[in-house]
Image: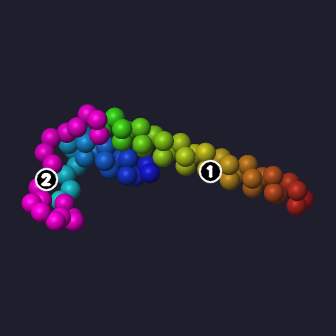
Amino acid sequence: MALFGLLWFLQGADILHIRPILCFADCEYIAGGSRVWEITEALSFILGIAVLIAAHSSYTNWNTRFRKTRG
């Protein structure tokens, strides 16, 4: 989620340009940035990082509890 958020943020900010991969009709690059994409994907990136941090802290807490019970 974090990586896609970063990718789409860079595309929305008009920093990164990727050629269309799967097209059915006239494929073109999307020119110009989009503030909506920048904001929503920056939030997606932040949420993805928060999920990673929460998962890591949950794992380390579980791991220390497990080691204490095993002796």
In the depicted view, which residue is nearer to us: 46 or 20?
20
Disc 2 marks a residue whose amino acid type is: Tyr
Image coordinates for residue 7, horizontal then vertical, percent: 32, 50
How many other residues sit within 10 Å of disc 2, few (<14), some (14-19) or many (≥20)? Answer: few
* 38 to 63, vertically: above or below: above
* 32 to 67, vertically: above or below: above
Report the residue at 21% width, 64% height from top: 21
Disc 1 marks a residue whose amino acid type is: His
Q: Label the magenta part by its dominant secondary structure.
A: loop
Image coordinates for residue 1, horizontal then vertical, percent: 44, 51
- Give the CA separation, mark 2 to mark 1: 38 Å
**Quadrant of the frame with the C terminus:** bottom right
Report the residue at 17% width, 59% height from top: 19
Image coordinates for residue 28, horizontal then vertical, percent: 11, 55
Q: Is residue 36 magenta?
A: yes
Q: Earlier in the sequence, mark 2 or mark 1?
A: 2
Identity of the residue furthest to the front in this view: 25
Report the residue at 75% width, 55% height from top: 63
Q: Is residue 47 magenta?
A: no
Q: Magenta part of the protein: which range?
A: 20-37
Q: Kindly identify which residue carries mark 2.
A: 29
Q: Kindly identify which residue carries mark 1.
A: 56
Report the residue at 36% width, 38% height from top: 40
Image coordinates for residue 65, horizontal then vertical, percent: 81, 52
How many other residues sit within 10 Å of disc 1, few (<14), some (14-19) or many (≥20)? Answer: few
**Circle 2: element type:** loop
Q: How many numbered badges does the structure rendering display?
A: 2
* 24 to 53, vertically: above or below: below
**Circle 1: element type:** helix
